Image (cartoon, helix red, strand yellow):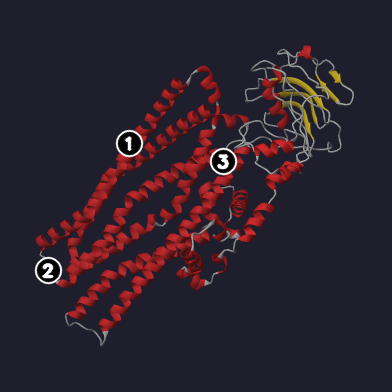
Amino acid sequence: MPSLLSRSPPARCRQPGRGTLVLPAASHFVSGIRCHQYPKSSPRLTFAHAAKHTFGLASTEARRLQVRPPFLHRTSVRTRKISSCFAYKATGLHNLLNNDAIQDEFDSERSASPFSVAGFFSRMSFWWINPLMKKGYRKPLEEKDIPALDVADQADTQYSMFVDKINAKQSSLFWVIVSCYKRDILFSGFFALLKVLTLSSGPLLVKEFINVSSGKEAFKNEGVVIALGLLLSKCLESLAQRQWYFQTRRVGIQVRSLLSAAIYRKQQKLSCFASIKHSSGEIMNYLIVDAYRVGEFPFWFHRTWTTGLQLGIALAVLYDAVGPATIASVLVIMLSVLLNAPLARQQQDFQKKLMEAQDMRLKSMSESLVNMKVLKLYAWEAHFKSVIEHLRELELKWLSAFQLGKAYTSVVFWASPALVSAATFIACYFLGVPLNPSNVFTFVAALRLVQDPINHIPNVIGSVIQARVAFSRISSFLGESELPKDQISMEHCVCSQYPIVIKSGCFSWDSSGNSNLRNISLEVKAGTKVAICGEVGSGKSTLLAAILGEVPRTEGMVVAATHRSLVSFSNPLFRA
């Protein structure tokens, strides 16, 4: 790695008309890093040409980009292997990649979101989606036919709200998300409660209807009132269930979008030590898998309490129908829960190990794809293939263990309703509970109240375990250290002729205190072509990263002009 043995005055490389580049003398570098000044005849590749071939722009659009960054001499063998540092204005490229005019023009062709302007009854009945359904009935839908997303539902809005909440409260990730969507959670929780109550009223109305048909009419036209009440309860049940599912799915998508934005923004600011801990494969897992599972959790959140509430109401209805024989039903349900209790903790451990194995496999596959040329050059395909297959077998091992446990839980809980009914009728026989049409039909109708929450218990347990693991992984990642904001000084250099200046800089990748670069003094004049040459592992990339502020500075000073664009040389997917 390049390190200076002394602080002797720097040597200047001058060339008429090409500016001045100030670097320490080449003899002071242990690795032999040298400064190259290329003549005016060096081949240039205009940025318009690069934009045309890289971004697929038309020639007229590409010529608008007036950026002309220098490239290294193509005939030099050494310069093909060196890293180069550019300081140039990227106004045209920035406007191209960050200009919202194209997106605004596309959005203007799309109609406004009908959901944002829909009234109360339109939202409750989903009437606002009818125009889209009619258009889809007449012709195949295209992207321009899909209404534009409302501003409140866009990822930028959700992420801004998330940042404001987390900066104000400084609490855990879970409670910050809850505080962001507490209104929507309460609104969907109301419909979840309404759905449980209307569903539970069915067996009671059936019992009263049977009593009326048996001649036990309390008032005139009681049967008509009960029939209308049963119809109304079913309509309310359907309405409540649809709104419950719709609201929770909407919140889930919003949570997923803000977490994806938070993970992406965090990756751009990770410190060097944190970047080593989290590979690109792991970060992709956070974006794709963990954010998705956290986004699915709002749908199952209300199931965690509606399941217990519905079971309690169902047992109360059963007690009203068969009396003490309900004890047998309670015992069967408790036995089912106890049989699955030890497995819940084990399932969580399996899920953690599965995610770790998946991270390792994605990391290896990503490294293999990125370095495919090296693998082909040295014929290492078979070795890397065996490594990836071994990691895949390890992942399948934990996946099989998790799915087998889930299957065991499902079998136990799906068999519970049949066991509940059998145990209850046996208890009625031994306890001498009379069975008449009224309590028999009520009991059969109440079995659905028991069956529905019991069947959902495995899914609830699985979603809670997956969301808990995903929350812990994302929270750990978002809590990692970031690059200090004072690594590069951006003051008093807008009009300077030296856009990049390093004075007696010492830089270290880790916190051990051993500097990878020591006593670096560097001045780069505007418009100067710079090449950093050295052996493999000598510190060329470290020096470039230090200029970008990606390597912690232990001593010295780094100054970079604010009107220049700093383009990182790492993975463009994350360091765009």
Secondary structure of the residue carrying numbered label 2: loop
- Residue at horizontal 53%, vertical 37%? 283
The mark that comes first in sequence, 2 or 1, is 1
The image shows residue 505, relative to residue 419, as above or below, that is above
Q: Residue furthest right?
A: 16
- Residue at horizontal 79%, vertical 32%? 559
How many numbered dots are placed on residues in this image? 3
Secondary structure of the residue carrying numbered label 1: helix
Mark 1 surroundings within 10 Å by alpha-carbon count, few (fewer than 14), some (14 through 19), many (20 or more) = some
Q: Which mark is residue 401?
A: 1
Q: Position of residue 185 (x, y in %)?
A: 48, 59
Quarter the N terminus occupies: top right
Q: Which residue is mark 3?
A: 478
- Residue at horizontal 39%, vertical 64%? 241
Q: Position of residue 502 (x, y in %)?
A: 78, 26
The mark that comes first in sequence, 3 or 2, is 2
Q: Which mark is residue 434?
A: 2
